[in-house]
Amino acid sequence: MSFQFGNSISLAWKKLKAGEHTVREFQANKLWQLSSDPNDVFDYRKTRLGLYRSFFPENYKYFGQVANLSSSLYERIFTTQSLDPKVLWYYMDHRYYAPITTQKIPSTVTDDNLIANHYLSGSMFVIPRDMFGEGIKKKSVEISIYDSLTSSLNYTITDDGFGNLIDNSFDKSKIINRDYELIYVGFNDKYREYGTSKNYKTDYIIDESPFYNTLKIENKRYIDYQPGIKTSDTDEDTGTSAYFGGTYLSVNEFQRFNFHRGQNFAFSFWLKIPENQTDTSTTYNSLFDKKTVEDFRLNTDTSQIGDGDDRPIEMVTNSKKYPFDIYLNNQTSAINKSITFKQGSDLLYSEVTSSILTANTWHHVVCQKTGSNYQIWVDGVLENTQNKIITTNVDNNHKFYIAGNGTTSSKFTGNLDEIRIYRKALTSTEISNLYDNSFEKGYAYQTSRIGNVFYGHGIICVSDSRPKYKNAFLGKTGNYDYNDNENGFLLKYRSTVTYWEHEVICKLRKNEFNFTQNPSLYTNPEMGSMLTDTYATNPNFNPYVTTIGLYSDKRELVAVAKFANPVEKRDDVDMNFIVRFDL
């Protein structure tokens, strides 16, 4: 027989129903009425759980959990820009990134542990969540870019499960361990300030090293942002560089760069200089300075600290002790357009100078101390070295400045890019890799990460500043010019769908449902007789339960539980049935 719970369940449903949600929201073909706000979907489902807690007033005990299951693999080769129901792609301007926070750390709209790229252009997919599921399954994205004519454009990228897209063609051994990186300033976050009025520029630079040093721009009116270093084989611009025309950077954590006399360290940076320096008040223009300005306290009595007169003031005191001093010799010097690297104590100092640099050309420079050797490398070549042992202290309490020395004189004019300071000496191989900015690899950027995946939002984007990735999904020129199998790509991903597993306890009291409405048990049903056959009226007869139906307050069927075998309904004890179903 069919045994259905109708009225009793309907009353409980009516009491617990929140708002005016209709039963259509629970039908299989319309499981959810999706809100226009993506955040409403998840919250809405959580509120649904409360509706199942008690189909009967006494059924207060509720069992439920969430199972996150991936859907079948989606895979397609793209050679044209057709309207695909699952994937849309187009040129982007990074509006999917949240603004820089007041803590000056790039933030994103994802809750995954990803590092955000902020570059000038890129390509992206938008996968509508309400069409393919709730999100993108972690570690399921794979995109193969291929060009049958130009092998340098071919690569395969995958996500790492933390929201980062990785180009698997990179040799990870050529990327220096970031634990040694004291500072990394690439200026790529400044793409927003290309051509911006001097009054709307921010007054800080983001350090993307593990230390997140605080770098402040002194007089932001005189800094500009321009295309960055060029590729070594195609002469294309990559990323963003800073042009210093009368300003400099101050590093708040200057004590972190107070290298002692026995410590190895390395400065790696790219620069492009004009024919002449604007500031010629001295024969040099500072690139990295820690010997000119220090904090000085008027009140040296520590017992009086806190009285208001113990605040430090900046004093110009050129120290004979300094862990490093790196500067460009200008046109008033006999060695114009060369770079000098020095370390000094009260008694001794070491000094090395490079060859003459070509103006208006990007050069990669490394100044480092390795053991007792002081070296300067230009464009991957060791140009000068001096072996000297300094036996007295070189550290001091002076401040650290980039592109200046903290005063109104000796300021650098020109472009700087990809500034890195390491707390170790670099090998010749590592220096060569930092100098390698080829179109295909670009190890100068020291990362295989080329974009991000926002799993919960259905967004896949490639936003790396290297030109190889500029039109990742857009064809050779960005106009969807795939030309059959040229510049096409293969996309794979899996989506996630959450199934809510529910259990409802339905109680049958011993005095309920001890009858049947099965017409096959009545005598002369065609004549309208309501008398049951004798075997059905026997005191030993009990009805059997085969089906349980769960209804809404509108008497509409919500769920049906079908038993594999009929279950006898007893009239001497209460019976409980557990109905399990997924939504």
Image (tube, helix red, strand yellow):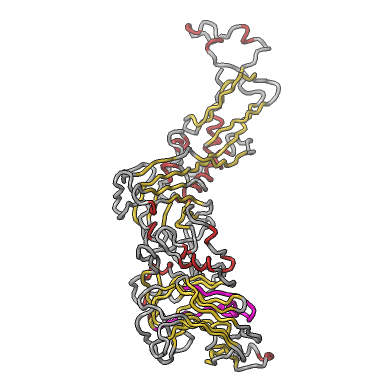
Is residue 251 on the magenta stretch? yes
Label count reads 0
Q: Which of the two residues, 422 or 231, is positioned nearer the viewer here? A: 231
Determine whether 274 is above or below 49 in the image: below
Q: Position of residue 246 (x, y in %)?
A: 39, 84
Q: Position of residue 173 (x, y in %)?
A: 55, 59
Q: Which of the two residues, 444 or 15, is positioned nearer the viewer here? A: 444
Extreme residue toward the right, this view: 572
Q: Quadrant of the N terminus?
A: top right
Q: Position of residue 313 (x, y in %)?
A: 55, 90
Q: Position of residue 287 (x, y in %)?
A: 47, 81
- Image quarter for residue 373? bottom right
Determine whether 279 is above or below 116 in the image: below
Magenta extent: 246-269
Determine whether 450 is above or below 328 in the image: above
Is residue 420 on the magenta stretch? no
In the displayed structure image, the side of residue 340 where residue 563 appears, left or right:
right
Q: Is residue 459 visible?
A: no
Residue at image coords 43%, 67%: 189
In the displayed structure image, the side of residue 233 where residue 525 appears, left or right:
right
